Amino acid sequence: MQKTILIMLLSFAMILSACAPTVPEMEAPTSELGTLQIAVLPIIDTLPMYVAQKEGLFTKHGVNVEFIPVASAPERDQLIAAGQADGMVNETISAMLFNKEQVQVQVVRYALRPTIESGHFFILASAQSGITEVAGLKGVEIAVSQGTVIEYATERLLQAEGFSADEIKTIAVPKIPDRMALLASGEVKAAVLPDPLGALAVQQGAVIVLDDSQHPEYGSSVISFRKEVIDANPDAVRAFLAAIEDAIAALNNDPAKFTNVLSENKLVPPPLLESYKIPLFPAAGIPSQEEWNDALSWAKQKGMLTADVSYADSVNASLLP
């Protein structure tokens, strides 16, 4: 059984590393607003973008959008830094790191935000660990990707449960497929995975010990654009966000209608497609200054930043519909 599970996990790991999302047929340029190029990871957070493309909503709002599939966050960040992509889904900590010396990107909207019904990040215990409650995680090494929103959310969630600093232990396992495999084999007792890979791990025997459904301020992702693009063509970004708003309204109203978009763009592992419940996506909004300051404080504590990064310069709500 364990061997079968590992084979399934490794197969999906190959999909994650080798298969970029299927790019929908590109829309022809539709107006003077031009084209926006969006770096897209194969993650559920990007679903509204694919829905907007499939439903012709970018065309409706007069902007052409091209997707650039990327396999990892570093690859995404390289494209943005080089000016080879205009926008992306990332997190506030990522935006802070871009802007630590000068403002390069601005957060313009939430992408995905946990809700009571659906968490975004899950702290899972391996089936072999015997851990079923939060207290069982005290002093246990939890596999995370260090210096990322995964580690931030993990620490904040455990602190919210009353853990002291010396009771929180993490171990660096940067690649998600590696974390999944180690969790399945029992080589690590606990690991943190995003939706929907957390659901796949549960299907294979892992136990959800804690998630961010009660603390959406820690697990949110955002949509960001290069400031140069915003300054040069704010109407294109406004049109993009208006299309996303329409897509989210359609998606939240009838999620079953868009199940095929999940499979076409490899956003959900094949074993989950029939049972996966699409999360509720947030209406127009941006991270609060309080959320920004908390993540900033954590990043400075970790030595990732040595000075404050301005919320006012980095988060831009003026483009929302």
Image (cartoon, helix red, strand yellow):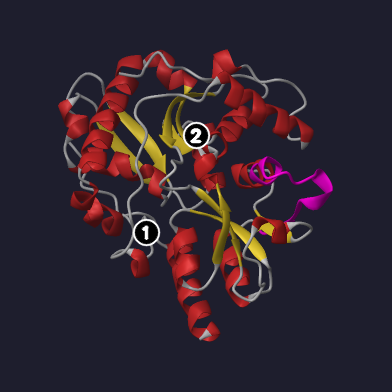
On the image, numbered disc 2 is attached to which residue? 80
Residue at 71%, 20% (x, y): give it: 308
| Residue 46 within the magenta-colored segment of the rendering | no
Magenta span covers which residues?
Answer: 157-173
On the image, numbered disc 1 is attached to which residue? 268
At label 1, counting other C-alpha atoms closer than 10 Å, the crowd grade (few under 14, some 14-19, many 20 or more) is many
Residue at 50%, 44% (x, y): give it: 213
Whichever of callouts 2 and 1 sits on the residue coming sooner in the sequence is: 2
User: Residue 237: percent from the left, percent from the top?
Assistant: 34, 22
At label 2, counting other C-alpha atoms closer than 10 Å, the crowd grade (few under 14, some 14-19, many 20 or more) is many
Residue at 39%, 56% (x, y): give it: 20
Give the number of the disc on residue 82.
Answer: none
User: Residue 79: percent from the left, percent from the top?
Assistant: 49, 39
Q: Nearer the viewer, residue 309 or 293?
A: 293
Q: Nearer the viewer, residue 185 or 38?
A: 185
Q: Quadrant of the C terminus?
A: top left
Residue 267 shows in the view: yes
- Residue kind at label 1, given as amino acid type: Val
Left or right: residue 82 versus residue 129 is left
Helix, strand or loop at label 2? It is: helix
The total of numbered circles placed on residues is: 2
Left or right: residue 21 versus residue 119 is left
- Residue kind at label 2, given as amino acid type: Ile
Q: CA distance from mark 2 to mark 1?
A: 25 Å
Mark 2 against mark 1, which lies toward the viewer?
1
Quadrant in which residue 193 is drawn: bottom right
In this rendering, the answer to whether 104 lies above or below 93 is: above
Helix, strand or loop at label 1? It is: loop
